[in-house]
């Protein structure tokens, strides 16, 4: 059992909805960054930030596979139980408490319904993303130098990223990544603003 400051830190971790979703996913099995991002529809950059935060709080551990991808898993079993003691005599729930409870139930029902609606819409978007990635692969043969650069450009299409974030998301070694970024920058495919890399837009920015 944990207590004191450790309880407070764990509650801070669980206070974020996306961190709770990531923990729920990792309770099923270890996952790597891209897998978490795709399954939960969270940007890879945000996933990395949440994972690093939970790693600092000793909630997560990681291991690498033969492709140098980091697989994250829970450092311990997490079960949260909240006991609420009724302040009224005889265990009778006060009417305002009951009203607040059912209001929370209705709100949760509505939110789940909204989520299901948007998830059904996201299925079409995910299909289009898969098709666009396949198109990128087929049209990149004379432009990109192999799977590493395809993976790199695909990651940068999601958001502007730092070198550390790209390493975390893709599993590409830092030396290989630096060489690929230098080539892609020289070729005018990606740009760097001094901190982050991103895919160049049509106007060259």
Image (cartoon, rainbow, N blue to C red):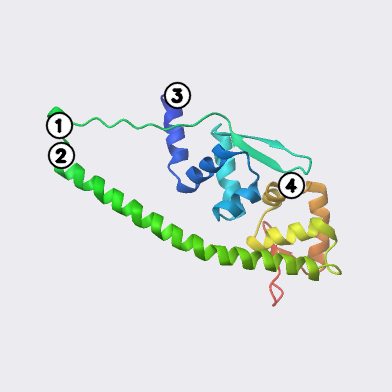
Say which residue label 3 marks.
2
Within-10-Å neighbours for mark 4: few <14, some 14–19, many 20+: many
Q: Quadrant of residue 81?
A: top left
Q: Which mark is residue 94?
A: 2
Image check: 200 left or right of 98?
right
Q: Nearer the viewer, mark 4 or mark 2?
A: 2
**SS at mark 1?**
loop
Give yes or no for contact between labels 2 and 1 (Cβ–Cβ under 8 Å).
yes
**SS at mark 2?**
loop
**SS at mark 3?**
loop
**SS at mark 4?**
loop
Q: Which mark is residue 88?
A: 1
Q: Quadrant of residue 146?
A: bottom right
Mark positioned earlier in the residue sequence (4 or 1): 1
Asked whether residue 45 appears in the rendered view, the answer is no
Give yes or no for contact between labels 4 and 1 (Cβ–Cβ under 8 Å).
no
């Amino acid at each position: 059992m944990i207590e004191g400051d450790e309880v407070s830190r764990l509650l801070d971790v669980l206070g974020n909805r996306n961190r709770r979703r990531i923990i729920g996913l990792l309770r099923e099995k270890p996952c790597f960054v891209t897998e978490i991002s795709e399954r939960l529809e969270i940007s890879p950059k945000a996933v990395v930030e949440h994972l690093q935060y939970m790693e600092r709080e000793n909630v997560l551990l990681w291991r690498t596979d033969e492709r140098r991808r980091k697989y994250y898993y829970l450092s311990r079993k997490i079960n949260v139980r909240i006991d609420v003691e009724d302040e009224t005599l005889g265990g009778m729930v006060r009417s305002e408490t009951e009203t607040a409870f059912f209001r929370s139930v209705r709100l949760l029902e509505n939110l789940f319904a909204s989520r299901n609606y948007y998830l059904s819409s996201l299925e079409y978007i995910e299909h289009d993303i898969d098709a666009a990635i396949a198109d990128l692969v087929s049209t990149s043969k004379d432009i990109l130098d192999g799977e590493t650069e395809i993976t790199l450009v695909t990651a940068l299409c999601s958001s502007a990223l730092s070198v550390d974030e790209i390493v975390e998301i893709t599993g590409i070694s830092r030396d290989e990544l630096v060489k690929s970024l230098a080539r892609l920058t020289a070729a005018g495919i990606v740009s760097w603003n001094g901190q982050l890399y991103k895919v160049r837009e049509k106007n060259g920015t």
